Amino acid sequence: MKRQRILSVIWIATTVFCIVLVPQLRADEHAKPNEIGWVQTNGPYGGNIRSFYAASKGVLLAGTWGAGIFRSTNRGNTWTPVNTGLAYEPGEGFVYVEVFAQKGEVLYVGTQGGLYASTDGSNTWHHVPNFRKSESISGIVVIGDRIYVSTLNTGVWYSDDGDSWLQVNNGFGPKSVRELSSVGTTLIAGSENRLFRKRANEDALTAINDDFFVQQIESLAVMDDLLYVGAYTSEGELFKSKDEGDSLTGITPENIGNPVIALAAFGATVYAGMYGSGIFRSDDGGDSWVAVNEGLTVTDQKVCALLAVNEDTVFAGTAEGGIFRTMDGGDSWVEVNTGLTNTTVGELAVIGKTIYAGMSERLVHSVNGGESWQPVQISSMPGEYLFSTLSVSDGVLYVGAIRFGPRDQGGVVGGVFQLDERNNALVQVIANNELTGIQYLEIVGTTFYIGTQRDGIYKWEKDSDPWMTDLGLKGHFITALSVNGENVYAGTDRGEIYRSEKAGKPWRLVNSTDMAGSTISRLKSVGSTLYASAWGKGVIRSVNGGDSWTPINDGLDDRAVLTMVTVGTQLYVGTHSKGVFRWMADERWWEPIGSLPRQVMSLGALDGFLYAGTAYGGVYKIQVEE
């Protein structure tokens, strides 16, 4: 639009050529992306696995939450992405895969964006013709020559030729179907809290067992003529039926404490996966159970998917740790994630030649530029923590973390941990159960500034007084901090920017209306200049300590800025959908750095390379000018 207006002016009055066109030509020149491309590093491997499928010819498929489909042809030893043709979430580059099925030589996959098919063994995918686009698919079942597809919004559909589709019940059945399976020729559907059934000689899905009404149905599995139902109640129930759902018997393992999310059966053995309690196995059809979690950490026991290939080989998909495999019937599990990059790296930090990548429940490091990643030991951390922020001071890595607990035990509490590099482990240096969740750390020398979710800001002097100083801003959700001389700056989730002189009360609101209503994602000081970024509002700059602000968004194609980093005097930002930009101070223009169709969550730099931590894509890197 801007270019069209300029050309119109030139057409009407060519005398303004030097005033209007030349600056625009400069802008176009700077808008060209770098020719150097981003390269995905080898990890960190893992991620959120939602579904499995054993296709023909020994092909295994894994559906992820965000990164689409990965395929293995060597029993899970290595995985490669196979997403060609799948539609991504607009502007985000995400594919959420829920379920697979196969009819003859045609593979089907159901995603949150529709139903897709492959006729070349999963190499390429195409949207199934005549099936509603953008439909969220929850189940696919093949019975004879007919294929059934369930959705979260429009019930169950069927097709005999894969081309024309009709609704079961003509749309009068359950609208939101979460699970779909079959017992012989009988179709079983699980809605939010009821079971439905359609036998071969029936035209409609009808509710069965009026006494079976739960909070939410999570999973279905079939072994011969037995139907297993995982349902979410306050106790996380598991049921078995010998008569297609007419009667159901509770077979919940004792003391599981979590709902059954995934089920798999082979022969006489049933596996049940819980979100938080790991995996249980039954060798007698579900009458008795034993926990089989050897090799799974507490984090890895958030199981979302199971696949039993044979009596001994089972694959488990987890919410964070990716894929695990047992080849001894569950007695031991090993991670098999090579090539599977579905991790969300929210924080990056660089110390010397080492890159640290923080995910919500894991911390890893690489000493070879991302060629391989090794875990940092967190077994010494009390309870279950989520990493919220990384910070470096004097060559030492510090980690801010959040722990969720019962309200009577503090609810959301926080702690700060220091990396013991010699032992590759985290050691707690600050623990305060009165803090409501640590969100951001800013460290200057030995002084720690700690921003929390609702408890405001605290200051702590390392190796001195064990108590922290309350700096105020109670009730605010602190999302960013920056210290410049004696001034401390704080950003909030409501677009507010506060300044405290001499690192203490009082706080003065130095907000710019340009950021109102948004979330401040980063505050960065470069010399005497302060930069602030926000979701949806881009970047603003202040050269007088925050007294006045100027938007600097020319060339920034995506103003949903998630992260900001300084490399020397260079300023870089990572965005929601348009990748990374560098601020060209002399031209007052944002230059795109290559093309990275990922949501950029964090940035770091090492040896002439810029590293980007992404959502569902691990870490990418690109060579940049020093």
Image (cartoon, rainbow, N blue to C red):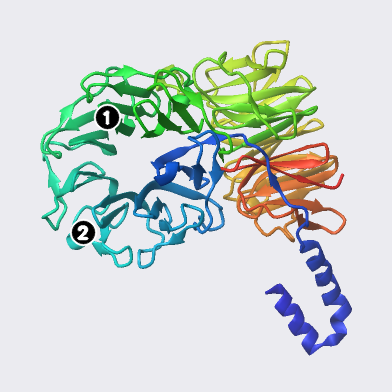
Tell me the mark number nearer the camera, choosing from 2 and 1.
1
Q: Earlier in the sequence, mark 2 or mark 1?
A: 2
- Residue 258: x and y in percent read 34, 26
Quarter of the figure with residue 523? top right
* Residue reaching furthest to the bottom: 12
Q: Secondary structure at mark 1?
A: loop
The quadrant of the image that shows the C terminus is top right
The quadrant of the image that shows the N terminus is bottom right
Report the front residue among 363 and 86: 86
Q: Say which amino acid is labelled 2.
A: Val
- Residue 227: x and y in percent read 20, 36
Q: Say which amino acid is labelled 1.
A: Gly
**Going 50% across and 44% down the picture, which residue do you hit?**
71
Q: Give the number of marks.
A: 2
- Relative horizontal placement of residue 530, taking residue 315 as reference (left or right): right
Q: Secondary structure at mark 2?
A: helix
**Residue 18, can we see it?**
yes
Q: Which mark is residue 343?
A: none
**Residue 458, can we see it?**
no
What residue is pinned by disc 1?
267
**Going 50% across and 41% down the picture, which residue do you hit?**
73
**Going 32% across and 27% down the picture, which residue do you hit?**
271
- Residue 580: x and y in percent read 71, 50
Report the front residue among 205 and 601: 205
Residue count near mark 1 (Cα–Cα under 10 Å), binned few <14, some 14–19, many ≥20? few
What residue is pinned by disc 2?
168
- Residue 199: x and y in percent read 14, 50
- Relative horizontal placement of residue 348, taking residue 131 as reference (left or right): right
**Distance between the alpha carbons at the discs numbered 2 and 1:** 32 Å
Is residue 497 placed above or below 165 in the rendered structure?
above
- Relative horizontal placement of residue 580, taking residue 70 as reference (left or right): right
